[in-house]
Image (tube, helix red, strand yellow):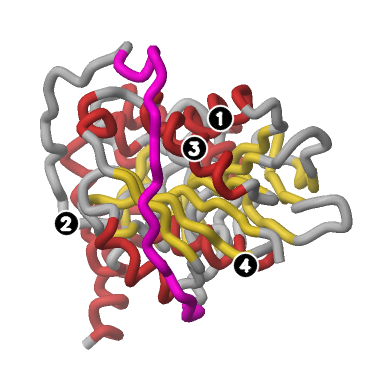
Amino acid sequence: MAEVLVYVDHVDGAVRKPTLELLTLARRVGEPVAVALGAGAEATAATLGEHGAVRVLTADATEFADYLVVPKVDALQAAYDSVSPAAVLLPSSGEAKEIAARLAVRISSGLITDAVDLEAGAEGPVATQSVFAAAYTTKSRVSKGVPVITVKPNSAQVEPSAAAGAVEALQVSFGATATGTKVVSRTPRETTGRPELTEAAIVVSGGRGVNGAENFSVIEALADSLGAAVGASRAAVDAGWYPHSNQVGQTGKSVSPQLYIASGISGAIQHRAGMQTSKTIVAINKDSEAPIFDLVDYGIVGDLFDVVPQLTDEVKARKG
């Protein structure tokens, strides 16, 4: 069976969930070969092996931490040359999509970004995408070269499948452009204790109807009761009520959780483009004509300041 390269997103050896989803999808089209780079790369092997990686190619060098993107592209190209894979899969993060694009150019291959599903086809992997602000669903395959595909988080259920996970050192030669952009400082992001927005299984978002930064505590309380991430519409972010890093939409982050709860959000196309692929959508809005109700699975017409606290209390009561 053909091998499929999977780029590993990890933090000091702790593998992030989107990579485990990629391994599940990779097994549909071949045998996963994981590529783990940077500090803690070898420590990922046990987890990757438990989720189907037959081999784990690892490399660690100061270039991966000290410089942006290009050293990782050099390493992934070295893995590509070594394996001759049937496909290359990466998570749809900002950095990984840049790596994917640069790799596709180098190997003269086609690129598919933000896939939400993947299946084997007679002429290569077939990717499902949600396009034109999620108004259409398309199925595509790369017609030239080895397909390079990025996949949105929460596109597949993680399915463990024991494999060898044999660790192999990856020999990497860095090109002249690898050190072109140096990282000069880092500031740790403040942690809220909530899941990462793009990876969360549940997202609770607030919009213009929240009517003030101080009122986002109502949204946060519901999110915390559900173990969810907190999102915000562009209107709420532009008003300064919530950080831009939590914006969901075409100019913010794209999410695809199992459950998306929109509170006080009208449903403008800009916002819908970032959340319309959510598996189940619930909207709370006092305007029964709000566009958001056109795409929801469940809609509640009511004041969010009445509905959301009651919902929070009910969730807490059921959790005991």
Instruction: Give the mark nearest the N terminus, 4 or 3.
Output: 4
Verify whether residue 149 appears in magenta.
Answer: no
Q: CA distance from mark 2 to mark 3?
A: 37 Å
Residue annotated with mark 2: 193
Label for residue 78? 3
Near mark 2 (Cα within 10 A), the count class, few <14, some 14-19 or many ≥20, is few
Q: CA distance from mark 4 to mark 3?
A: 22 Å
Label 3: element kind: helix
- Is 317 drawn above or below residue 76 in the view shown? below
Chief SS of the magenta region: loop
Residue 159 is left or right of residue 123, and the answer is left
For residue 135, which quarter of the picture?
top right
Q: CA distance from mark 4 to mark 1?
A: 22 Å
Which range is magenta?
A: 160-179
The image position of residue 189, as x and y in percent, is: 15, 38
Q: What amino acid type should be assigned to the residue bearing mark 3?
A: Ala
Q: Nearer the viewer, residue 267 or 50?
A: 50
Label 2: element kind: loop
Label for residue 27? 4
Residue 59 is left or right of residue 22, and the answer is left
Quadrant (top left/top right/bottom left/bottom right) for the C terminus: bottom left
Q: Going 42% across and 36% down the picture, which residue do you hit? A: 75
Residue annotated with mark 1: 103
Instruction: Give the mark nearest the N terminus, 2 or 1.
Output: 1
Q: Nearer the viewer, residue 197 or 108?
A: 108
Q: What amino acid type should be assigned to the residue bearing mark 1?
A: Leu
